[in-house]
Image (cartoon, rainbow, N blue to C red):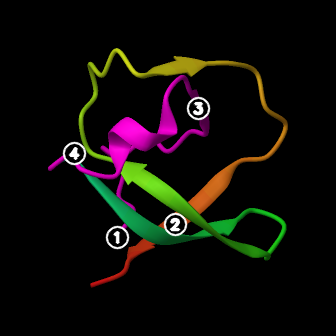
Amino acid sequence: MKNEDTRLKIVRLLEPSLCLSCRYASIATVEMENGTSRRMLHCRRFDCDNWQTEEISETPRSIQEES
């Protein structure tokens, strides 16, 4: 699902419970650059007030949303 126009980053959620009912959030399997996979929330809203960016050494490579 990744293309040149997509920037993937890991952010810190301020109130994770708010994301559970948000129409922009979904559960996804995220493949990291080191080859491992993790389940995370995928937010498709780029101006959300519920997350905060921070410097994280891990970089996601791709996202596979779960149905």
Magenta span contains residue 7: yes
Residue carrying label 3: 11
SS for callout 3:
strand
* CA distance separating discs 4 and 2: 22 Å
Task: Name the chief secondary structure element in magenta.
Answer: loop
Verify CB contact (< 8 Å) between mark 1 and mark 2.
Answer: yes
* CA distance separating discs 1 and 4: 21 Å
> Of tags 3 and 4, which is closer to the observer?
4
| Residue at image location 26% in from the left, 44% down from the top | 44
Q: Is residue 20 above or below residue 54?
A: below
Where in the figure is residue 60, as x and y percent of width and height?
63, 55
SS for callout 1:
loop
State which tag comes first along the sequence, 1 or 3. 1
Residue carrying label 1: 1
State which tag comes first along the sequence, 3 or 4. 3
* CA distance separating discs 3 and 4: 16 Å
State which tag comes first along the sequence, 1 or 4. 1
| Residue at image location 35% in from the left, 37% down from the top | 18
Q: Is residue 41 among what the camera can see?
A: yes
| Residue at image location 71% in from the left, 48% down from the top | 59
Question: What number is the disc on residue 19?
Answer: none
- Residue type at mark 4: give it: Cys
Residue carrying label 2: 62
> Of tags 4 and 2, which is closer to the observer?
4
